[in-house]
Amino acid sequence: MTVTGPASVAPVEGKLGVLCVGLGAVTSTLIAGVELARRGMAEPIGSLTQLGTIRLGTRTENRVPLIRDFVSLAELDDLVFGAWDVFPDDAYVSASRAGVLDAGRHLEAIGPALRAVRPMPAAFDPAYVKRLDGPNVKDGIHKRAMLEAIRADIESFDGIPSCNAAYA
């Protein structure tokens, strides 16, 4: 294979849907962190795309731009979140129960955005997870039907099922 020159990458435009399996402690903390960073209330610690750098050339050239300035990536403001979970709790309730973030300092400031993220019914088979049972599950016993329902969720996700207040 012969490479004739640098590849052309179209600039990013539009929203980027981030769909997560589960809306528990990890996912609700991720969403809360992004919401806080959007508002300038927190740094996106741990985000390679937001704080990481890339070295260009040799070390002595000292060319190390931020990755986000070097590659066309979706901005934090362009991310829209969705999730599937066996429990119907929104991201605010999940984050509150997880206890990872301070309610007064973190959660209240972004409460409307977190409350807008409500999980879609999960594809769930209790045969695989014996100690978990929740009411927010897809109807149907057959795995193929659950797969098709997940596919429909993905195809219809626009990031604004109930998130109009959060992302308007």
Image: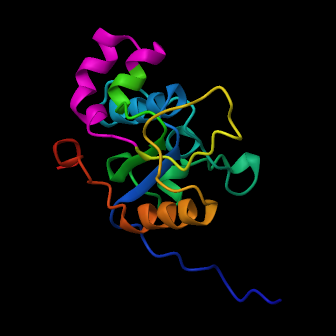
Q: Residue at the right extreme?
A: 1
| Residue closest to the eye, 29 or 7 | 29
For residue 151, above or below residue 65: below
Q: Is residue 71 left or right of residue 91?
A: right
Q: Position of residue 16 (x, y in %)?
A: 40, 58
Residue range corresponding to the magenta coloring: 96-119
User: Taking the image as drawn, is residue 31 in sight?
Assistant: yes
Q: Is residue 64 left or right of residue 151?
A: right
Q: Is residue 116 located in the magenta-colored stretch of the structure? A: yes
| Residue closest to the eye, 111 or 8 | 111
Q: How is the image coloured?
A: rainbow
Q: Position of residue 150 (x, y in %)?
A: 50, 60
Q: Position of residue 12 (x, y in %)?
A: 41, 67
Q: Is residue 119 left or right of residue 98?
A: left
Residue shown at 43% from the left, 16% from the top: 97
Q: Residue at the front extreme?
A: 141
Q: Is residue 23 located in the magenta-colored stretch of the structure? A: no
Q: Where does the N terminus fall, quadrant-wise? A: bottom right
User: Taking the image as drawn, is residue 42 in sight?
Assistant: no
Residue shown at 74% from the left, 46% from the top: 60
| Residue closest to the eye, 31 or 125 | 125
Q: Position of residue 163 (x, y in %)?
A: 24, 46
Residue shown at 51% from the left, 46% from the top: 20
Residue shown at 64% from the left, 49% from the top: 54
Q: Is residue 9 left or right of residue 97?
A: right
* Count of numbered tags: 0
| Residue closest to the eye, 110 or 91 | 91
Q: Quadrant of residue 145?
A: bottom right
Magenta residues: mostly which secondary structure?
A: helix
